[in-house]
Amino acid sequence: QVQLAESGGGLVQAGGSLRLSCAASGRTLRGYSMGWFRQAPGKEREFVAAIDWSASSTYSTDSVKERFTISRDNAKNTVYLQMNSLKPEDTAVYYCAAQHVLARKYDYWGQGTQVTVSS
């Protein structure tokens, strides 16, 4: 079992920055791809960014490209999402998730952290 705990959310003005962290416990994250997702009120959860287990490849949705950066520190069992130039439409609950390299879907999810961007 992998337990994931997000932190770093909060209230920020448009144009500001936040850094989300996702700390894992129970098992090393080596061998897991990690993703960040978000869900805004009244909307479905959407993919934000992902990083493979070796950090050699990253992916992000078009709406956050060049603004958000996903990274990981396997030694600390932690994944990060650096969010810059935040916009009100980035307001959502942000979740991290882990997918084993042999799995077809994300196996483990955190509880989420709220990000609110004021205009």
Image (spheres, helix red, strand yellow):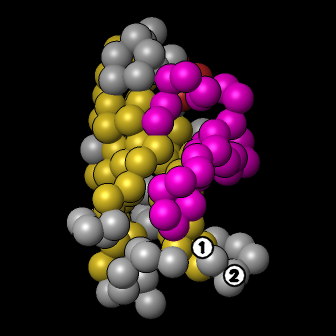
Count of marks overlaid on the render: 2
Tell me: 66 left or right of 70: right
Which residue sits at x=52%, y=38%? 92
Q: Is disc 2 surrounded by few (<14), some (14 to 19) or many (20+) residues within 10 Å?
A: few
Q: Is residue 48 above or below residue 33?
A: above
Which residue sits at x=40%, y=11%? 15
Which residue sits at x=66%, y=26%? 63
Q: Quadrant of the N terminus?
A: bottom left
Tell me: 92 left or right of 63: left
- Residue 23 location, x and y as percent? 31, 65
Looking at the rendered structure, the kind of residue marked 1 is: Gln
- Residue 24 location, x and y as percent? 34, 72
Q: Are marks 2 and 1 in contact (CB under 8 Å)?
A: yes
Residue 115 in view here = no
Real-space Cα separation, disc 2 to disc 1, in angstroms: 6 Å
Looking at the rendered structure, the kind of residue marked 2 is: Ala
Helix, strand or loop at label 1? It is strand
Helix, strand or loop at label 2? It is loop
Between 117 and 31, the one lying in front of the other is: 31
- Residue 17 location, x and y as percent? 34, 23
Between 73 and 20, the one lying in front of the other is: 73
The circle drawn on residue 103 is 2
User: Quarter of the image holding residue 76?
Assistant: bottom left
**Residue position marked by numbered label 1 in the rendering:** 99
Which residue sits at x=41%, y=43%? 81
Residue with the most extreme left position: 76
Residue 116 inside the magenta-drawn segment = no
Tell me the magenta residue range. Answer: 41-69
